[in-house]
Amino acid sequence: MQELLLNNGIEKSTIVLLLMLPIVATMVGISRHIIGMRSLGIYLTLIITFIFFELGVTDGSIYSDTLTGFKYGFILMFIVFLSVIVSYQVIKDWTLHYYPKLSLIITISSLAVLSLILTAAIFSLNGILKINVFTLILIVGLAEKFMSIFTRKSLRASLFITFEGILLASLCYLLISWSSFIELITEYPYAIILLFPINYAVGRLRMLRLSEYFRFWSILTEEEPK
C-alpha cells in the first residue's frame, strides 16, 4: 500500500499523519472512558497534537523533534490562551451577540500571535518564523474553543479542563513523534485495523473510570454497618 501511494506522488509525511489520526482519536477515547480525563474533545485534541507535530518537523522529514514541538507549541498556545482570557474578561458583559464577541476575541488573538511573530523576527527566533499559515490559522482557531469553555464554565473549571486537554494532547504527541513508533506504523500500516476491536471494547465498558475510583474511594471502601 505504501509503495503504491508513494509511486503516485503521495508524500510519506501525508501517509504518516493519516495513520496517526485514528491512533490519537483512540487514545482520546481511552483516556476519557478508562482513565476519566476531561479533554477538549477529539477534534481539538487532534488539532493541538498535530500543531505540536508540525512545529517540530524539519523540512522534508517525517519525524518531529519533540522538544522543538513542545517549545514553540506551548509558547503559541499560551499566547492565544492568555489573550482569550484577558479579552473575554473585558467584553463578557458587553451586550453583543455571541459571534461578534467571538470575532473580537479572534481578532485580539490574531494580533497577539502577530506581535509574537514580530518579536521573533526582531530576535531572530527562526523556529517560530517557519510556521506555515495553516498551522497559524489552527492555533488562532483555538480561541473559539477556549471561549466556548469560558462561557459555560467558571474560570477555575476552564483552567482545569484546558490543562487536562493539553496534557492529553502532549501525551499523544509524545507517542506519534516517537521515531520507532513512526517506523513501526509505516512498516505495518495494516496494524491500524486493531483499532476497531480496541474502540469496540472501550465502547462496551461498564465500569467506573480510574479517576472515579480515586474520587469515591472513601465511599467504595466504607464498611457497611453491622
Image (spheres, rainbow, N blue to C red):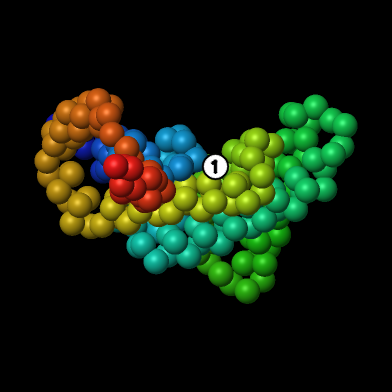
**What residue lies at 31% left-to-right and 47% top-to-bottom?**
223
Can you give x and y, in whole percent of width and height, for residue 126 in the image? 53, 66
**What residue lies at 38% left-to-right and 50% top-to-bottom?**
218
In front here: 223 or 52?
223
Instruction: Give the residue furthest to the bottom.
Output: 123
In screen coordinates, is 88 left or right of 62? Answer: right
In screen coordinates, is 70 left or right of 108? Answer: left
Dot 1 amino acid type: Leu
Can you give x and y, in whole percent of width and height, for residue 152 in the image? 65, 35
> Does the rendering let one see residue 222?
yes
Q: Secondary structure at mark 1?
A: helix
**What residue lies at 15% left-to-right and 48% top-to-bottom?**
184
Instruction: Give the residue furthest to the front.
Output: 226
Which image quadrant: the N terminus? top left
In front here: 8 or 171?
171
Q: Which residue is mark 1?
A: 138
Instruction: Give the residue furthest to the right.
Output: 95
> Does the rendering let one see residue 133?
no
Can you give x and y, in whole percent of width and height, for residue 37 in the image? 41, 45
